[in-house]
Amino acid sequence: MVFFMYPVDWFSSIWTLIPIFAYSSAGNFASFFEVGAGISLDKRARISWILPVLLLAFAVNVLICSKALLDLVTSRILGAKAHDWEKTVHTGGVRA
């Protein structure tokens, strides 16, 4: 009953949820949100100088993931055989 007495302005509510949706849908942006939250909560603006370093790490991560995706697609298209995993032999802590 209270819901109908006090209507919600959905447009402004949706705009406040967009950063939360972006954070949860694209995990690669998590570090930017964490730094932003840290800057906001700790009130330390100087830490924002770390963002260009995070941008570089993000770009490297995008390149690595893109190469892995291309490798997967080309192996599927060319019909390459499955990758064989060669396990590392461990001696259980005993030096051989």
Image (cartoon, rainbow, N blue to C red):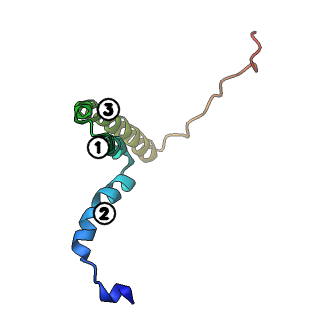
Most foreground residue, 48 or 93 = 48
Image coordinates of residue 38 in percent, x first then y, are 33, 41
Residue beneath disc 1:
36
Identified at 27% across, 29% down, the residue is 53
> Local crowd at mark 1 within 10 Å, few (<14), some, or many (≥20)?
some
Quote the CA–CA distance across marks 2 and 1: 16 Å
Determine whether 18 is above or below 76 in the image: below
Q: Tally the marks.
A: 3
In this view, which residue lies farthest toward the top? 96
- Where residue 84 sits, quadrant-wise, is top right
Q: Which numbered disc, 2 or 3, marks the residue closer to the eye?
A: 2
Q: Quarter of the image holding residue 96?
A: top right
**Tag 3 residue:** 57
Please give the name of the residue rendered at 39% of the width and 90% of the height, measured from the top-left corner: 1
Mark 2 or mark 3, earlier in chain: 2
For the residue marked with disc 2, what is the amino acid? Leu
> Which percent across, then down, holds residue 12?
22, 70
Hey, what amino acid is under mark 1? Answer: Gly
